[in-house]
Image: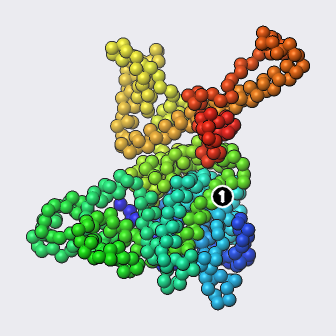
Amino acid sequence: MATDDHMKVTAVGLPSGALSATFGRYELENGQHIEDVVLGYSTYGTLNETGDNAVIVGHSLTSNSNVSEWWSELMGEGDACALDLANEFVVCVNYLASPYGSSSPVTPDPGKQNGESYAADFPTPVTVRDNVRLQRLLLDRLGVRHLRLAIGGSMGSMLALEWAATFPDFVTELVLIAGCGRHTDWAIGIGEAQRFSIMADAKFKGGQYAPKAPPLAGLATSRMMAMLSYRAPKSVDERFARGVMENPGECADERVEKESADVVSVEGKLGGTLVAEPKPRAATAMRKPSSHGDIGCTAHANESASETLPYFAVESYLQYQGKKFIQRFDANCYIQLTYTLDSHDVARGRGAYEDVLRRLTHRTLVVGITSDVLYPFSLQAELADLMPNAEMYAIDSPHGHDAFLIEIKELNKAIARFRRGERADPDAARIANRFPGGAAPRSAPREDVEGKTSLTIPFAGVGRRPDENENENESENASGSSLGVLETLTEGELRGAVRALERELEKSRAREERQARRADALLQEVARLRDEASSTAKTLHPRLEDDSVSLASSFGYGLRLVPANPPPSARRYQPVYGEVKSPANGADAPIAALGAF
């Protein structure tokens, strides 16, 4: 398994190999400004004479601009690499408020005479859109006239999407990995819990803490919480299996016994070894620490209180990750960056969310992780459904959100295929190409040997019913060939292919649902017009007060009056997420209030 902290740096500041650019006064969306704003950035490859072979890469929340440090597997020469350094100019810019070279709470504040850092005085919030507009100034300075691609994972995918929305004609293609079109309440809540853990540290002091006495315990706790959101329950359970930490230095007999057990090494172990299924032995388990002096945290004032507590390996692992993180990050920066995440809404100020995404016609690859709990797969499916030229690729991994950093080789292959103009999922493409038009036909009934009718799903030609004039032997050969195709696919490939086909089906259903919603809205409007016409007619023709005289006979047309508020069972759609709040009467709310469009 890949390491859980993909960063190699051990301190804040511009990383080795990165560059720096200074601009003047930069106005932010929040009405504030940054004087002499600075951007840290990294470049790879060479910009061509026309300036149109550039690629912008968005990094994740706590990464820096050195793409080679955390995505080296995607970089190389030739079209087998997602980022082809032989033919492209790759740029990655450190976000504002990040501690790796750009203006942030740890950089000097020009407004302070003593050269102190911004600290709590850094403008809040800096939005994703602020970053995109400033990065455009940098690209202009570098001579970039057009972007072939905007790509990013997690927070980086939000930046890439914002690039397309802010400068739609400046970008050709998008690769959006494990992100979303707008930050959800779930993700905002996770971020607030992490922020609060920092703010609750007595050393935080509202952000005005001494540089030599930062809130280490709060920041380490925040990182521990984040690490769990980057994984998935199954991945954590299988990795640690309720193992406990044991003291090192056993006697020879104990060492032999240990070697016969199922031993699993854990990156970040704190002075011990994890035994996945520990057997009873004379060796004593490691005591759970009653305090953590390196971060100023006391867990138990009574040290003996921890003697009876098991020291689970997952606890040791999280503590290690938290303590490792505080060496390379700053608490104020972390808080500011989570606010930047919360600002993300690609439709903000641009119209209805669905309409904004439908206007982004860029050729797009959307990558989702089936086990992601931070940004669930449904969020990427939403993007793929709404963006007209988007293709969905599923990473079927148990490792959660961080799978885009773990399953890196397969991700590179998928992106490289997409950039060559092929389907990102080769198994889905192989299945689709066996049918005219590039898509598998609908399921068709067939008769089995007993004459009963059953449903067969045509998968790579399996279950295909031969034409009446088709030679029986040819049919058998075709069936055998199709079975061979299935047999060559691994379980993971099958799941990925099925997932891709399911997305195509869901996309068709989504289109059908949108049409149904529009139809419901039109019927609602027709009913309103009918009521208006009826009222007008009764005013003009008093005899219409007599129910025996119909409106249709008076005006020469007839319309079926539909109820303004059909029962819930008749609803063919659900409220649009985050668009409107349903009133107290819930299911009886008018159609328009539920976002019919």
Left or right relative to 281: residue 450: right
User: Is 456 above or below relative to 548?
Assistant: below
Which secondary structure lies at badge 1? Answer: helix
Residue 273, image x, y percentages: 25, 69
The residue sitting at 52% across, 58% down in the picture is 189
Q: Count of labels shown?
A: 1
- Residue 537, image quadrant: top right
Q: Label 1 sits on what residue type?
A: Trp
- Residue 35, image quadrant: bottom right
Left or right relative to 244: residue 4: right
Q: Is residue 152 visible?
A: no
The residue sitting at 56% across, 76% down in the picture is 207
The residue closer to the viewer here, 317 or 535, is: 535
The residue closer to the viewer here, 52 or 573, is: 573
Residue 533, image x, y percentages: 82, 23
The residue wearing badge 1 is: 163
Furthest residue to the right?
Answer: 540
Q: Residues within 10 Å of mark 1 (few under 14, many from 20)?
A: many
The residue sitting at 38% across, 45% down in the picture is 492
Residue 77, image x, y percentages: 52, 62
Furthest residue to the top?
Answer: 548
The residue closer to the viewer here, 52 or 161, is: 161
Residue 367, image x, y percentages: 52, 50
Left or right relative to 505: residue 1: left
